[in-house]
Amino acid sequence: MNSIELSYLVFGIILLFAVILDLGLLSKRSKSISIKKAFYQTLFWIGLALGFGIFVWFTEGKITAIEYISAYLMEWSLSIDNIFVFILIFSFFGIKKEYYGRVLLLGILGAIVFRIIFITIGIALVANFGWILYLFGAFLVFTGIKMFFVEQDDEFDPSKNKVYVLLQKILPITNEDAGGKFTKQIKGKRYFTMLFVVIILLATTDIVFALDSIPAVFAITQNKMVIYTSNIFAVLGLRSLFFLLRGAVSKFDYLQQGIAIVLVFIGVKMLIEYFDIHISILVSLSVIIVCLVGSIVFSLFFKKVDIPEDAADDK
């Protein structure tokens, strides 16, 4: 067994252990997670991800470990942007808070499947068409500039979501409460509930964000193991991060701008490599950290808009 195979094996064991622990010991089927508990669960997932990075350092070397940490931070920061859209989806469809945890879990597991598919396709494209990295770079610069000036959550309207519109056309859907079930029998006919709809929307909405994050990670590394593991670790931490940020969404007004600057930087990094100009992975890691920390600190001191908090009962 070589070091790459060992890394995949260790990652699989950690993942299995973490999911079982999170589902079996840290979470209950129909109970809303408090901010305090979400904080500890978030630390748990971040700790696991960073711990795996230490393992990579010893098995693959310093450069690969730094690539992994950079890719993880990039994916983690972009996943935060998912949270704000997830909040809109739950609010629009009137999902009860006690169902949030289970719905998020299933939606995120679906998102992981889509991520794996997209990453595999991306790796194949880059391997066969190296010039596509420049297209990725141009796309990231465009996306970053747009994200900097336009609030994505203001643009997102769940009622006009193409997946939701399609589901309404092909499936019988009911707005009636089914006690946390995904289907309900009404007058002898089986209907799908809003819980089912939201799970599909969470998984497919992540596809939109993957269109940003997956090209971005190729600017940091083309190591398959690093790309897969950093993405999956970042997405798995989304559930606890949702409960943590749901009550503090109004405190991070400028985080999106910080993420946008990172995207533009990564895009430019990819484009200038055409001129044989290479930015070291340490510089990339530093820019990611400075932009994220800086935007969070800036948000704490300067308010942009008043966003109603949704955590009055999450004590």
Image (cartoon, rainbow, N blue to C red):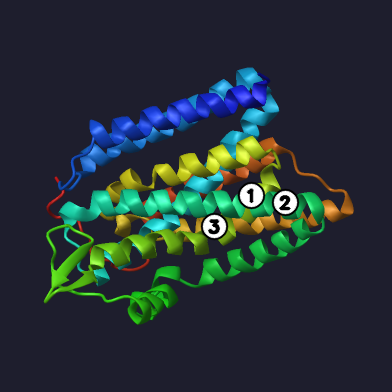
Q: Residues within 10 Å of mark 3 (few under 14, many from 20)?
A: many
Residue 124 is marked as 2
Mark 2, other Cα within 10 Å: few <14 / some 14–19 / many ≥20 = few
1 left or right of 250? right
Q: Is residue 137 visible?
A: yes
24 or 133: nearer the eye?
24
Q: State the image coordinates of residue 131 (x, y, percent, origin top left).
A: 82, 58
Q: Report whether 133 appears left or right of 237.
A: right
Q: Is residue 274 above or below residue 288?
A: below
Residue 210's disc number: 3
Q: Amino acid at mark 1?
A: Thr
The location of residue 190, given as percent across then percent down, is 21, 70
User: Horizontal placement of 33 versus 252: left or right?
Assistant: left
Q: First in sequence, mark 1 or 3: give its number.
A: 1
Q: In this rendering, is residue 170 above or below 248?
A: below
Mark 1–mark 3 Cα distance, whole angstroms, equals 13 Å
